[in-house]
Image (cartoon, rainbow, N blue to C red):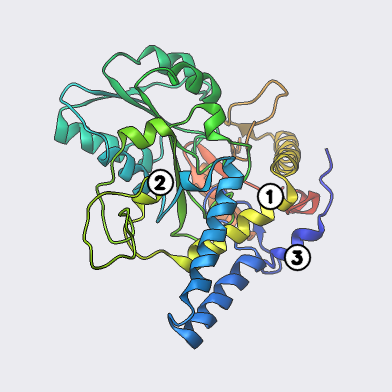
Amino acid sequence: MVVEPTPLRVEFPLQPGLIYLNHAGVAPLPRRSARIMTELATHMTQHGAARYRELDAACEKARQSCARLLGVATGQVAFVPNTSEGLSFVGLGIDWHSGDEIVTTDQEFPSNIVIWLDLARRHGLRVHRVPSGTDGRVDASALLERVTARTRVLAVSSVQFGTGAVVDLARIGAELRSTSTLFVVDGIQSLGLLPLYPAEVGIDALCADGHKWLLGPEGCGLLYLSAKGLEQIQPRVLGWHSVANAGDYQNIIIEPRADCRRFEAGSPNILGAAALGESIDLLLEVGIDVVRARVHGLVVALVRGLRDLGCVIHTPLAADGFPDAGILVFSHPALPTATLHRELLARNIYHAQRGVGVRFSPHFYQDATDVALAL
């Protein structure tokens, strides 16, 4: 599959000679996202809070973009600083009892395991880290087999950061939908790349920072909660913005907002939210299905080229023989991973070293030229 150039490449003015293959790490900002941050910063410089309604409108416009991406109502989306804090809001908001259980995988990024291990230590919980298959796949059936009446949370990443393994979220969501167990998903390695509609899948809590496939800035992400999630998860970080009468400073109440905005305690990161909204609008303009197809084409071309070089592919493969998402982990038959990592960086091929190999992760705006230069 040949991936043709796209006119939207102009949105990503990378330095000449830089081959950027680390969108699963921190992605470059599109021009339009950088521009809105500059415009809003200038607005604040010139007006302070004298025209704050315009700033608030920019934030709410971004919330609408997040909601469109997820296919949910705007009230089901809150802005959070990052995935770690979003997952912590979820974990800390549950009414735990000694003996409660959490089911997860053995591949999770620290964001989606540290909070659960800490809660287990403090509340006497059991955390089941279900082993993956020898091929790196995450077995949805194995996860579901560990769910009991005491399981309060099943927590997984939609795509595993270190292997690129794609989790069968629909299977898990269908099984848990009629139970009291909360289905919690770290969606940072799929949002902006793969279609993910949490209400359809049966996800109760979805968290993701915006700085990877969503092409947003670091420090601003989103949190989605289903009705079940909103019922079981209470805000533990509170402030003037999270209460039902936000803006009424003379009447102090502690009743939270009725929707997901109860998890936004204080003043918002307006610049970050606006930039995230612009990046999401760009992805929606292209179409998530188109984004997915273009990235798949790039990954297919990389796999074929790497195999021709004798490299070993470590990412679990789909039925077509290629990875399902945008993460490709590989190793070289003659070069130790650390050496390969250094040599790629010396050639200005930006990537990440992960596990037994190095990780490439291209995005939709790239094309066959990037593949040729990376091999």
Q: Nearer the viewer, mark 3 or mark 1?
A: 1
Mark-to-mark CA distance, 1 and 2: 23 Å
User: Could you say where residue 231 lies in the image, as x and y percent from the top left?
Assistant: 33, 34
Mark 2 or mark 3, earlier in chain: 3
Answer yes or no: is residue 346 visible. no
Q: Position of residue 369 (x, y in %)?
A: 79, 53
Residue receiving disc 1: 284
At a point 38% along the width and 18% down the height, the residue shown is: 179
Nearer mark to the viewer, of 2 and 3:
2
Question: Which of the pair 119/203 is nearer the observer?
Answer: 203
Q: Amino acid at mark 3?
A: Val
Quadrant housing residue 204 = top left
Residue under the image location 18 percent in, 21 percent down = 99
Up-down relation of residue 19 to residue 320 (above or below): below
Numbered disc 3: secondary structure: helix
Callout 3 environment at 10 Å: few (<14), some (14 to 19), or many (20+)? Answer: few
Q: What residue is shown with label 2?
A: 260
